[in-house]
Amino acid sequence: MTKLRLGMMGGGPGAFIGPVHGIAARLDDRFALSAGAFSRDAEKNRQAGEGYGLPADRVYASWQEMLAAEKGRLDLVTIVTPNDTHFPIAKAALEAGFNVLCDKPATLNLEEALRLRDVVRASGKSYGLTYTYSGYPLVREAKALIAEGRIGRVRKIVVEYSQGWLSQEVHNKQADWRADPAQSGLGGCIADIGVHAFHLSEFVSGAKVEALSADLGIVVPGRRLDDDCNVLLRYSNGVRGVLVSSQIAAGDRNGLRLRVYGETGGIDWSQEQPNILTINGHDQPSQILHAGAPYLTYGARVPAGHPEGYLEAFATLYRDFADQISTGVPSLVPGIEDGVRGMAFIETAIRSSRNQNWEQLL
Amino acid sequence: MTKLRLGMMGGGPGAFIGPVHGIAARLDDRFALSAGAFSRDAEKNRQAGEGYGLPADRVYASWQEMLAAEKGRLDLVTIVTPNDTHFPIAKAALEAGFNVLCDKPATLNLEEALRLRDVVRASGKSYGLTYTYSGYPLVREAKALIAEGRIGRVRKIVVEYSQGWLSQEVHNKQADWRADPAQSGLGGCIADIGVHAFHLSEFVSGAKVEALSADLGIVVPGRRLDDDCNVLLRYSNGVRGVLVSSQIAAGDRNGLRLRVYGETGGIDWSQEQPNILTINGHDQPSQILHAGAPYLTYGARVPAGHPEGYLEAFATLYRDFADQISTGVPSLVPGIEDGVRGMAFIETAIRSSRNQNWEQLL
Amino acid sequence: MTKLRLGMMGGGPGAFIGPVHGIAARLDDRFALSAGAFSRDAEKNRQAGEGYGLPADRVYASWQEMLAAEKGRLDLVTIVTPNDTHFPIAKAALEAGFNVLCDKPATLNLEEALRLRDVVRASGKSYGLTYTYSGYPLVREAKALIAEGRIGRVRKIVVEYSQGWLSQEVHNKQADWRADPAQSGLGGCIADIGVHAFHLSEFVSGAKVEALSADLGIVVPGRRLDDDCNVLLRYSNGVRGVLVSSQIAAGDRNGLRLRVYGETGGIDWSQEQPNILTINGHDQPSQILHAGAPYLTYGARVPAGHPEGYLEAFATLYRDFADQISTGVPSLVPGIEDGVRGMAFIETAIRSSRNQNWEQLL
Amino acid sequence: MTKLRLGMMGGGPGAFIGPVHGIAARLDDRFALSAGAFSRDAEKNRQAGEGYGLPADRVYASWQEMLAAEKGRLDLVTIVTPNDTHFPIAKAALEAGFNVLCDKPATLNLEEALRLRDVVRASGKSYGLTYTYSGYPLVREAKALIAEGRIGRVRKIVVEYSQGWLSQEVHNKQADWRADPAQSGLGGCIADIGVHAFHLSEFVSGAKVEALSADLGIVVPGRRLDDDCNVLLRYSNGVRGVLVSSQIAAGDRNGLRLRVYGETGGIDWSQEQPNILTINGHDQPSQILHAGAPYLTYGARVPAGHPEGYLEAFATLYRDFADQISTGVPSLVPGIEDGVRGMAFIETAIRSSRNQNWEQLL
């Protein structure tokens, strides 16, 4: 199997998510990192290129240069730049004939997302969005089990995503761009992690949010964007839900958890213990499913009892996107439709919180 | 120490909570069960009295008879009857000079609760309300730790109480009276268990709910009262909160869990694992406190590692109420003010859900 | 149902296990505490009697006086005295026609246990031994499930009981008598808690220890009895096992855990989380059974999700012993045979450790 | 940083551990896979080479050919072949001037290990042994904490490694070579996984096993090598320990767990939940340390709350070995001394079990 030629936008030294994409792309050995525009800082850009073993002439000062020079020489570009550039880069790349794999969020706002959807459709190219958590084997298993009716018709969804790292005033590269509306968009917590929870809940349950009532807050003084958000949800078919998310949940780490209740039981999955999936049946013993076990539909890289984590989930999105590009068959990698819904969720939640009212989504 | 003479109203055979009160009263050997009106069914009433070893002449056909006949012969009466009788019995008992320990809810609605508050104040008697979960040692420890500033100023509260036993259509004594507005009041899930979660959150955090936006649903067709409820909360000082409660959370048992986040950390307690209390400090190792350990303020009946549970928590309320009656010093046992707030919460949540709006509490 | 008349030996103020027996006897309301010889200290004895509401003439200065005076007036005596008096009291009580419920160990050594077995057999009376952990509902469930073949033929047993309270030099009533061979017998850790683990493993698995190789140590300087013990076991049918027990496992509380592996799966139960029982099936999802759930054989006092603990387990032994006395039908309460095997285990382990060799049991 | 040129021996299609080494080598981008002799089957060998993107002339039919042809063209060789070839390949590679990273066990028996030690010493090259579990960040943290005296002087060690995958008769490539003494050596369970537990216990505690009493069994009929092993241990300074390991623990997955107790507390780590480390202090709240947290000495690849697992632990050994080769400074990667001790442990356990006696190690 020949490796796909990949060009990376962003992800230079000091970034959190850049190296994660690097590892994810490498893990299954399906890609050859062939070009990059890693940083607007020339020296950092050069260093990153060298670190990846790239020849100097395939390390570009800007994404525009890279797209122009690499036309026809790459199978895909990955976008790991700040949020405000996701839209222009993705648009230009698709229009230039590249497949695109983009870090979330798809765009800075809903309007851009809708425009990008048109671009994707017109391009005929593959567009993927790395909602990381959809790459975990047991998340996919949960989706499949619910689709098969294992817990009956879905009735209630509780999803939470609590972090504590912004519970104090923090100033560093990671914290600063997230606090700047120009770089990160209209939402703080709701856009950074709340939308992950939103996506996970739809991905697994198959239900779609139709309306919501949000209460977004700024807890740490001086912030311009929300750092805490709580949302009542109404999914399709009258399913009620709750989304609780925070970056000021002091002492919490990366507390993403999803519970979906159906007529006959519920599923429960937590990102911090991703290798088990609990199925609670009504008046039945609870069942614990273990990633990698032979009775599962979605395999793991190592046998049950050998834990996998965040990087492997990310790598699975890369691997699946490689398949998607190679075969043309859609995969489980989230796409532009997920991007559009995510931006709609963020904007609707902000509007609902401002108006203190229930609002329709889309 | 002489035992307090106790008369029990309700709690005959077939009841769930009656025998629990019986065990709770016995556990610390502070009470002598001296009289009772256990059931409106004469045969069941007789059996219960015999079971408790009471002479036939102190087993009464009605609470009215008992109050009349036992004046001056009992130190307290406990009320374990259906919700709709809590108010008249408590009122009559207090006016007749008895101390009263009543199963929750205090009354059927807010108006009764406000009237009962007047009666309690006028009576000079002790009135206790068995919000069970306030009897757990680590719940009390959490309350004390927060009051001492262990997690800094409170910022966010997440409380949940999920059960699955009504996820199917159920018909038995327990399910039926809860589904009948005449017997149980205006609320279903919100009044049966949501209010426990509400109380626990205020008891531990010290914050008071000021406004809320609720979404109450009837999930199982044919019900007349809510069986699922999700509520956004605003506590005093702008603290945001979420309350998630359900009786249709299929596969869940008695999932009461409270998380309170402050400036520097958070506490986490779950009723199904009541003997540990987790304190998550920001950028610190998590701490697990074990009930019965020597470093705690609130002791347990047995040393750390020897689990205690629901019955012991209930018994602690009885023991503390015995102290309160004997010494006149207020205890941690919830009182009429908690009863009033609980009814206000229930009525406000129902109104908010009907109006799809934020509503002020009291 | 008339209550059984109970006379208590030992259990005066300051004891740990005395009040536990008191609560256990009270919980299900099956006994009337009718007489006692609580302490060799006259004042403490008087206080205890008063605390239990006994008339002064049924509080005795010695067990001998009590047995003589109460003949025919009690249904059973419970023995909660120091270990060295268990044998003479039990023997005398049985010979005087009382049923006997005795705290473990049955006797001070194997020879006494064998003699007591003869006395029990000759007496025709019920003799019970409060190996507490056999009273937990899920321990009994595990026993039943294994007997039914749920995990296939038993192949391996791992049982541990780790405490840390003697990891430092401790001097108080509880620590001191345990460190004195005259009061506690030949074994320290092995006799105090190791034997609990031994009993639990046989009770649940149905297998019997036939040989062992023990390594007993004194870790804290100055002790005369072992405070740490590790034992290789051979049960009937060639089943291998390991018993790990310690009182110097610093930081541990009451870590009794049993795992039994069969041909097709294993069970796992921990005393510190007694309300769940895990069944791990080979290449199957794990199952978590919850105490109080409707699918179980052995019921709990409260529904699933309402935790029970140590006191309830103890009370269940009392309740079952009440049934045994009332009906004459043997119950699950351990008896003299368990006492004999326990003493044999202790003596064999001590001998094996001294000889550094495998030794046969009995 | 230039990448180290790596040649791989073994690891062709169908192997479990080969691809794991491949991913581990790739993850941190420190190696360039430059040559290989992947399989004795020519077609599989060719496929593997192609899969790794190697030119055909650097894919060799045998390790002997590869060593001869690649002299001076590789920085290291990794050995992922069946156990019986570890010794000859490692010996030849070292003598030919290659650094060597070898899958465990180092050799087939103690005699070979001692000879290999001489070769390593004489070669002046780096020799690493991939005892995977020493690569987990919290295992290293535990080692450092104990060395710093966090739990006081070590007193007791309990280590277990339970798997259930051989609880039934299994026939496949993985099971078969392990059951064949010629390929896997004298030990079954004891050599395959028991030795991992042995190594982990010494690595973390700093104590060395001096004597042991083992009970090894063959549980599934027809096997020629042990599939269950239980061992009493005496470490240096009189520290007692227990090692419990099994491949017939039906329903278990990869249950490696280490507890080390000191004078003032204990540590507890489980491989199936590798991102937390529990420190239980005597009469103190338990502490849970989270991998990736800022208060730790050993960092993780992603922030706390983003789980890492088995592959990352493996990759860490590769990364550290890269550092060791590049700088000449010894790393935490286990070496030949660990290999020698492992073989001594296996042989001593087998001898002890046969003789039913305590035996000295080395």
Image (spheres, coloured by chain):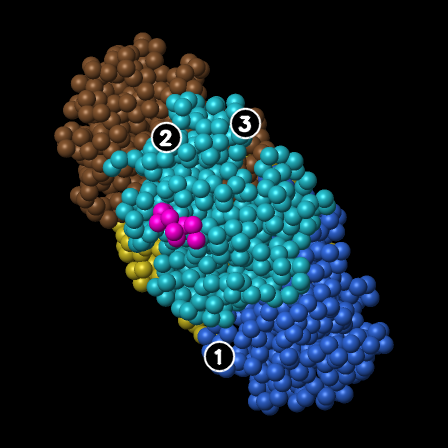
Chain colours: A cyan, B blue, C yellow, D brown
Element type where label 3 sits in the image: loop
Q: Specify whether disc 3 shares its chain with disc 1.
A: no
Q: Circle 2: is it few (<14), some (14-19), or many (20+) Cα within 10 Å?
A: many
Is residue D276 left or right of A77 when viewed as pictured? right
Q: Which residue is mark 1?
A: B221
Q: Is residue C69 above or below residue D1?
A: below
Looking at the image, is mark 2 or mark 3 earlier in the sequence? 2
Identify the amino acid type marked 2.
Ser
Q: Chain of mark 1?
A: B
Q: Can you tell which of label 1 and label 2 is closer to the viewer?
A: 2
Does residue A319 appear in the picture of this structure?
yes
Element type where label 2 sits in the image: strand
Task: Point out residue D128 in the picture as x, y percentages from the top left corner.
Answer: 35, 22
Q: Is residue A49 above or below residue A96?
A: above
Which residue corresponds to the image point at 75% horizontal and 79% vertical from the top-left? Answer: B111
> Which range of residues does the magenta coloring cover?
A118-126
Residue nearer the viewer, A206 or A156: A206
Task: Point out residue D300 in the picture as x, y percentages from the top left corner.
Answer: 49, 33
The rendered magenta stretch, by its main secondary structure, is classed as helix
Element type where label 1 sits in the image: loop
Residue nearer the viewer, C194 or D209: D209
Q: Residue C331 appears in which quarter of the rendering?
A: bottom left
Q: Which residue is mark 3?
A: A41
Residue nearer the viewer, D145 or D153: D145
Is residue A313 left or right of B326 when viewed as pictured? left
> Mark 2 and mark 3: span between their CA atoms?
20 Å
Q: Circle 3: is it few (<14), some (14-19), or many (20+) Cα within 10 Å?
A: few
Does residue A273 appear in the picture of this structure?
no
Q: Which residue is mark 2?
A: A34
Q: Circle 1: is it few (<14), some (14-19), or many (20+) Cα within 10 Å?
A: few
Is residue B131 left or right of C321 when viewed as pictured? right
